Amino acid sequence: MHTSRRRFIRSAAALGVLAALPGWSCAKSPSPKPLHILVLGGTGFIGPHEINYALSRGHKITMFNRGKTAPGLFPGVETLIGDRDDQLDALKGRDWDAVIDNSGFYPRHTRLSAELLHGHVGKYLFVSSISAYAESLTVDDDEFTAAYAEMDDPNDESDSIYGPSYGPRKALCEQEVSKVFGDDAINVRPGIITGTGDPTERLRHWLRRMVAGNEILVPGQDDLPVQYIDAADLCGWMVRLLEAGNGSGPYNAVGAEEPYRARPLLEGLIDATGSTSTLTWVDWEWIRRQASEIPAYGPWYGEGPIPFMQVNNDRAMATGLTFRPIGETAKDMIAKLGEDSGPGLRPGGFDLATEAALLAKWHLEKG
């Protein structure tokens, strides 16, 4: 489908649906119908965005988690202590209007919570991932035409949460929720989530360099696509989807309206942040010849998984998914660079000294 056609469909669909969504144009206004929402997790990256937004809309929140990560983050919010691994007693005999499942990574755990909560919550919103799609994904696929990723043994729980089986397991988790909840299951598939609290360097790496004001090495092609979504946009939309009460099925929650392209994105961020940095694009082949170890540059490392950076988000946009300018996201993240740093931060890019040495050698060779 041509881009202009997609934009027209999005605009036409969204105009009708957005007006029906409570408070879509005024994010902080109270919801006409306060909900009691159960959040499985809640203290990681996106959970606080969900909870803060829901509270600002007048909803009541209950969290269920192990009580190990940031246990004092929401002192006024009810917290039930338990574990997804068959320690769900704290959820028994309770009713909620909806549940947001942030912490379902293994299908067995998701099946246990879905079966226990069936009949006790109205909607089950599962936070999945576009990694749930098979590598056969194309830019023409949508939520209903793309194939699921698969794994040889669906019961294998041997690797880590974010290991090689992350995507196939997310696909299996979705299927468990859908089996139990049917039309009351909502499977949200985000792509690259960023914003304040982001535990990765997939955007923050570039912001750190821009704050420093130095020349920035950018590997690869300058026209590669990338789809960032601010956690605040994602989480606000998910809460409003529950408010509307008619969400069902899968949604690709990727941003923004159209994929960003590497060069205009980074140049725009330099302008938005007032940075004095300059950008130097360097061939990946040259970098590989110089460095013994290549860091996990993101999100357009190497040639990039192109279809996974151009995922169709028409369906989510038609139900009210909107996007802040990424320059605003960048400014919020820069203001919290110190707070969001720590031992749990996933690194990205070369360190400053290595990058400076590579740039010097690149310029020397290129004259």
Image (cartoon, rainbow, N blue to C red):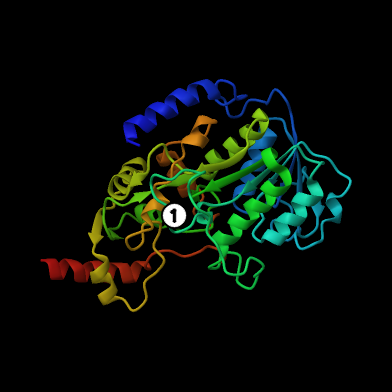
Query: Considering depth in this image, is 225 or 360 the residue closer to the camera?
Result: 225
- Is 252 positioned to the left or the right of 355 in the image? right
Q: Residue at x 36, y 54 (%)?
A: 306
Few, some or many residues within 10 Å of mark 1 (<14, 14–19, 20+): many
Q: Which amino acid is tagged 1?
A: Arg
- Is 240 positioned to the left or the right of 73 in the image? left
The tally of labels here is 1
List x then y, in percent, for residue 22. Answer: 62, 24
Query: Considering depth in this image, is 91 or 262 the residue closer to the camera?
Result: 91
- Is 51 positioned to the left or the right of 261 in the image? right
> Which picture quadrant has residue 4?
top left
Q: Residue at x 44, y 39 (%)?
A: 328
Height in image: 132 above or below 56? below
- Point out the image quarter for the C terminus: bottom left
Height in image: 235 above or below 13? below
Q: Which residue is mark 1?
A: 204
**Residue reaching furthest to the right:** 93
List x then y, in percent, for residue 93. Answer: 89, 46
Residue 289 visible in this rendered orientation of the protein: yes
- Is 8 positioned to the left or the right of 198 in the image? left
List x then y, in percent, for residue 318. Answer: 50, 30
**Residue reaching furthest to the left:** 367
List x then y, in percent, for residue 76. Answer: 77, 42
Does dot 1 land on a helix, a strand or a loop?
Answer: helix
- Point out the image quarter for the N terminus: top left
Q: Residue at x 59, y 52 (%)?
A: 45
Residue 64 visible in this rendered orientation of the protein: no
